[in-house]
C-alpha cells in the first residue's frame, strides 16, 4: 500500500469510528459525567481536611486547580485498548485484520484518536461549568510556553497509555481472561498516576520512586506542568523520563505481540 | 352435540409465594455451583482477582494514611475510624462484585445478541435471572480482607456489642441491596443505549465516594449519598453503628428506603421491557 492509500484508509476508518462512537453517545455521556464527578469527590475530601485545620503542604488553590483539570487530562490521554484487543485475540477476530495489509499497525492508534477527540468535545462544557463554579479558587498559568509544554507532555502521555494498554492486551495470547490484569493496571494507574491523590502529597521518602515510575507520566506530569510545581531542571528530567518510558513500553508491547502472533492459532473461525 | 371433554387444569408452577421463593433459591444454588466450576476453569484469573483485590485494598488505604499524616481528625473522624470505614467499603465492594457486577456488566450483551428473548420466556422471574445468574466467587477474598481491615480499625476502640453488630449488619444488607438495585437499574438502560460498558466507571465513582465518611462532603453531596445514591447506608452508617454512634432510626430509614428501591426497580424493569424490541435476535 502507498502512503496515499494508507492516509485515505486512515481517514475513512476515523470517520467510521466517529460514527460508531456517536452511536453509543448515551454511554459516552455517562463515562464523561463520571470522569468529572470523581475528581470533584476527591476535591471535597481535601477541602474538608483544610477546613478541619489540617496542615497540608499545598493550599486550596492548588487542590481546586488540580482536581478540576484532572478529568481533562485523564480523558484526553485515556485509552481503552486492552479489552477489545484481548477479545479479538480470543475470538479469532484478529485473523481478519491480519490479512488486510498493514492496517492493523494503525488501527489501535486511530481508534484512540477518534475516541479522545469525541470525548474532548463532549467534556468541554462539563469542565467549563466546573471552571465557572470554582473560578475564584482556580489558578491557571498565563505563560504560553507552559501551555506548549503541557501540549507536548499530553501527546507523550497519550502514547504511553496506548502502549501500556497494548502491552496488557497482548497477554491475551497466553491468558484466557485478562480481566484481573486490566483491573490491576487501573488500580495502579489511579494511585501512581496521581488520579486519587496528587503525587505532591506523598511522603518525601517516596518522591524519587514516584518520579521514576511510568504512571506518573500518564496524568500527573502534564498536570504538574500546569499547576506550576516544576523547575526547568524538573521539566527536563520529566520529559526525559516520559520519552524513555514511551520507548521502553512501546518496545515491551511489540516484542510479545510479535511472539504471540507467531504462535497464534484460531480454533473457532 | 357431544360435549367437549373436560381438560384438567395444569398445576400452577408455584401455587404460593413460598413455593416461588424456594424454587428461585434452588435455582440460585445451581448458579453458584456453576460459578464455582467456571472459576476453577480460569485459575490464573481466579488468583489474579484475589491479588488485585488485595492490591485494591492496600491502595485504598494510601489516601487515608496520607490524609491523617497531616492531621489527627477530620470532621470528628480519627485515623482508626477512617481505616475501619475503608475496610467496610472494601467489604461492600467485595459483596457487590461477588453477586452483582458480572450480571450488571453483562446485561447489554443480552440486548446486543438478542438473548433477552430467551430470558423473558424462561419459567422464572426475568429480573431475578438477570440479577443473579453470574457470580464471581474469587471476590469472597475481598470481603474477608475488608473484614480484616475493619477489625484493625475497630481494635483500638474495643469490640462493639451484639446490638451494634446487628444494627451494622442490617444497614450493610440495606446498603448493598440499594446499591445493587441502582447498579442493575442503570445497566438496564441498555434497552435504550444498547451498550452499558461504561457502567463500571459510574459504580466505581460511587463506591470510591463511599470510602470516606459522608460528613466529609458538602451538604448537597451528603443528601445525594443518603437519599439518592445511598452509599452512606453501605459504609458510613454501619461503621458509625460499630463505633457506638449509630441509631435504630437510621436502620429503620434504611429498611424503608430499601423497600422503596426494590419497588422502583421492579417498576423500572416493567417500564424498560416495554421498549425492548428484540431487534438483534
Image (spheres, rainbow, N blue to C red):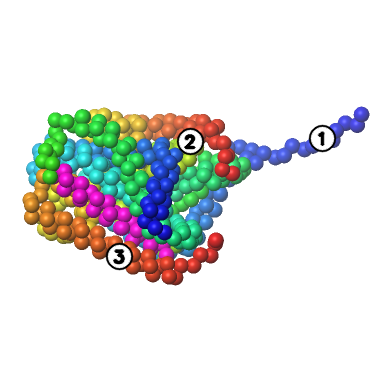
Between B111 and B162, the residue placed more toward the observer is: B111
Q: Residue at x 25, y 64 (%)?
A: A248
**Labels 3 and 2 share a subunit:** no
* Any part of residue B71 in sight: no
The correct choice, above or below, for A90 with respect to A12 in the image is: below
Give the mark toward the camera: 3 or 2.
3
- Magenta stretch: includes residue A163: yes
Between B152 and B129, the residue placed more toward the observer is: B129
Between A165 and A67, the residue placed more toward the observer is: A165
Residue A252: image tag: 3
Residue B192: image tag: 2
Q: Quadrant of residue A19?
A: top left
Which range is magenta?
A: A146-173
Please tell me how many numbered marks the rendered image carries.
Answer: 3
Distance CA(mark 1)–CA(mark 3):
76 Å
Q: Secondary structure at mark 2?
A: helix
List the residue tagged with mark 1.
Answer: B6
Residue A45, x across and y down, in percent: 20, 40
- Whether the residues at callouts 1 and 2 have beta carbons within 8 Å, the answer is no
Q: Residue at x 23, y 49 (%)?
A: A154
Disc 1 or 2, which lies upstream in sequence? 1
Q: Residue at x 30, y 40 (%)?
A: A120
Q: Read off the chain for label 3.
A: A
Crowd band around label 3 with a 10 angstrom C-alpha radius: few (<14), some (14–19), many (20+): some
Q: Quadrant of residue A115?
A: top left
Distance CA(mark 3)–CA(mark 2):
41 Å
Direction from residue A99 to residue B227 in the image, left or right: left
Give the mark toward the camera: 1 or 3.
3
Amino acid at each position: 500500500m502507498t502512503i496515499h492509500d494508507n492516509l485515505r484508509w486512515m481517514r475513512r476508518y476515523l470517520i467510521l469510528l466517529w460514527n460508531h462512537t456517536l452511536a453509543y453517545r448515551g454511554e459516552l455521556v455517562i463515562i464523561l459525567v463520571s470522569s468529572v464527578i470523581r475528581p470533584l469527590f476527591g476535591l471535597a475530601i481535601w477541602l474538608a481536611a483544610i477546613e478541619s485545620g489540617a496542615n497540608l503542604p499545598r493550599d486550596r488553590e492548588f487542590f481546586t486547580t488540580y482536581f478540576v483539570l484532572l478529568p481533562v487530562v485523564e480523558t484526553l490521554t485515556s485509552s481503552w485498548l486492552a479489552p477489545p484487543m484481548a477479545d479479538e485475540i480470543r475470538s479469532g477476530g484478529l485473523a481478519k485484520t491480519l490479512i488486510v495489509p498493514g492496517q492493523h499497525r494503525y488501527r489501535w492508534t486511530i481508534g484512540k484518536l477518534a475516541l479522545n477527540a469525541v470525548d474532548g468535545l463532549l467534556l468541554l462544557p462539563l469542565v467549563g461549568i466546573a471552571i465557572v463554579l470554582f473560578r475564584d479558587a482556580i489558578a491557571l498559568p498565563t505563560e504560553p510556553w507552559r501551555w506548549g509544554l503541557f501540549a507536548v507532555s499530553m501527546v507523550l502521555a497519550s502514547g504511553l497509555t496506548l502502549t501500556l494498554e497494548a502491552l496488557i492486551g497482548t497477554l491475551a495470547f497466553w491468558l484466557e481472561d485478562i480481566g484481573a490484569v486490566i483491573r490491576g493496571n487501573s488500580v495502579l494507574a489511579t494511585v501512581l498516576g496521581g488520579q486519587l491523590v496528587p503525587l505532591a502529597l506523598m511522603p518525601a521518602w517516596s518522591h524519587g520512586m514516584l518520579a521514576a515510575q511510568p504512571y506518573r507520566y500518564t496524568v500527573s506530569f502534564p498536570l504538574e506542568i500546569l499547576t506550576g510545581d516544576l523547575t526547568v531542571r524538573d521539566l527536563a528530567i520529566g520529559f526525559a523520563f516520559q520519552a524513555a518510558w514511551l520507548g521502553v513500553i512501546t518496545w515491551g508491547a511489540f516484542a510479545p505481540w510479535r511472539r504471540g502472533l507467531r504462535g497464534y492459532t484460531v480454533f473457532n473461525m | 352435540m357431544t360435549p367437549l371433554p373436560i381438560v384438567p387444569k395444569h398445576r400452577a408452577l408455584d401455587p404460593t409465594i413460598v413455593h416461588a421463593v424456594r424454587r428461585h433459591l434452588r435455582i440460585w444454588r445451581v448458579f453458584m455451583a456453576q460459578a464455582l466450576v467456571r472459576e476453577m476453569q480460569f485459575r490464573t484469573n481466579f488468583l489474579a482477582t484475589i491479588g488485585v483485590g488485595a492490591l485494591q485494598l492496600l491502595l485504598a488505604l494510601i489516601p487515608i494514611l496520607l490524609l491523617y499524616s497531616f492531621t489527627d481528625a477530620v470532621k470528628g473522624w480519627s485515623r482508626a475510624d477512617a481505616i475501619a470505614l475503608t475496610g467496610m467499603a472494601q467489604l461492600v465492594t467485595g459483596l457487590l462484585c461477588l453477586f452483582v457486577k458480572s450480571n450488571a456488566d453483562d446485561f447489554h450483551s443480552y440486548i446486543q445478541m438478542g438473548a433477552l428473548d430467551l430470558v423473558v420466556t424462561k419459567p422464572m422471574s426475568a429480573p431475578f435471572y438477570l440479577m443473579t445468574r453470574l457470580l464471581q466467587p474469587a471476590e469472597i477474598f475481598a470481603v474477608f480482607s475488608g473484614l480484616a481491615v475493619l477489625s484493625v480499625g475497630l481494635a483500638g476502640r474495643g469490640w462493639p456489642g451484639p446490638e451494634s453488630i446487628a444494627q451494622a449488619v442490617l444497614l450493610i444488607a440495606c446498603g448493598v441491596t440499594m446499591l445493587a438495585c441502582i447498579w442493575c437499574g442503570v445497566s438496564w438502560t441498555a434497552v435504550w443505549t444498547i451498550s452499558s460498558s461504561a457502567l463500571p466507571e459510574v459504580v466505581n465513582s460511587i463506591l470510591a465516594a463511599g470510602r470516606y465518611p459522608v460528613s466529609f462532603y458538602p451538604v448537597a453531596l451528603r443528601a445525594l449519598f443518603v437519599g439518592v445514591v445511598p452509599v452512606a447506608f453501605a459504609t458510613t452508617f454501619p461503621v458509625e453503628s460499630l463505633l457506638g454512634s449509630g441509631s435504630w432510626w437510621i436502620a429503620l430509614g434504611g429498611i424503608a428506603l430499601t423497600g422503596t428501591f426494590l419497588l422502583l426497580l421492579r417498576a423500572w424493569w416493567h417500564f424498560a421491557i416495554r421498549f425492548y424490541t428484540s431487534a438483534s435476535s
